[in-house]
Amino acid sequence: MDKFLQQFPIVTEIPVAWGEMDALQHVNNVVYFRYFETARIDFFRQINLLDDLQTTGIGPVISENSARYKRPVTFPDTLLVGVTISDIKSDRFMMHYQAFSKSQQAVTTLGASQVVMFNFKTGQKAQLSEQLLSALRKYDG
């Protein structure tokens, strides 16, 4: 687990709920996108991206999501979801996720999201601010 934690400067801890398991007795595949969303919002809060949304009306939207399931997860467990950033462009960037199971002591799921900046006032794509570019570059992994 220490090796996993060293790879990610921002890690979100998520307890697995009983109701997230499906009829096959493992966490349903769609739930991982909620886990990724939780980690994404935690990441955004820590780099103050959501504060910018309140003042500028510019914020992130997801244009693409993917997941690769390596190991099933069951209740009870706690996942650590690490986030890295790549492919930073003027208006978008990629977020990469790894979910690590505390009970299995292994990475169970990999994921990625294409994040595009959007101006909610104009309904148009927007540019990343210099402040946001700087914050993202710290996590470009």
Image (cartoon, helix red, strand yellow):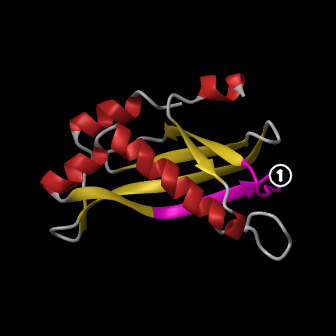
Q: Is residue 74 magenta?
A: yes
Q: Decide which of 97, 79 is in the foreground and name it.
A: 79
Q: Decide which of 45, 58 is in the foreground and name it.
A: 45
Q: Which element carries disc 1, helix, strand or loop?
A: loop
Local packing at callout 1 (Cα closer than 10 Å; few below 14, some 14-19, many 20+) is: few
Q: Decide which of 60, 82 is in the foreground and name it.
A: 82
x%, y% of residue 108? 76, 47
The quarter of the picture where residue 134 lies is top left
Q: Is residue 59 visible?
A: yes
x%, y% of residue 112? 58, 52
Say left or right for 68 vs 53. right
x%, y% of residue 72? 82, 56
Q: Is residue 47 magenta?
A: no
Residue drawn at (28%, 39%) of the image: 132
| The N terminus sits in image quarter | top right
Total labels drawn = 1
Residue drawn at (65%, 69%) of the image: 30
| The C terminus sits in image quarter | top right
Residue drawn at (50%, 57%) of the image: 37
Q: Which residue is mark 1?
A: 71
Say left or right for 50 vs 116. left
What span is in magenta? 63-77
Determine the residue located farthest toward the right in the rendered image: 24
Query: Is 40 above or below relative to 26?
Result: above
Q: Is residue 89 visible?
A: no
Query: Is 88 above or below relative to 72?
Result: above
Q: Amino acid at mark 1?
A: Arg
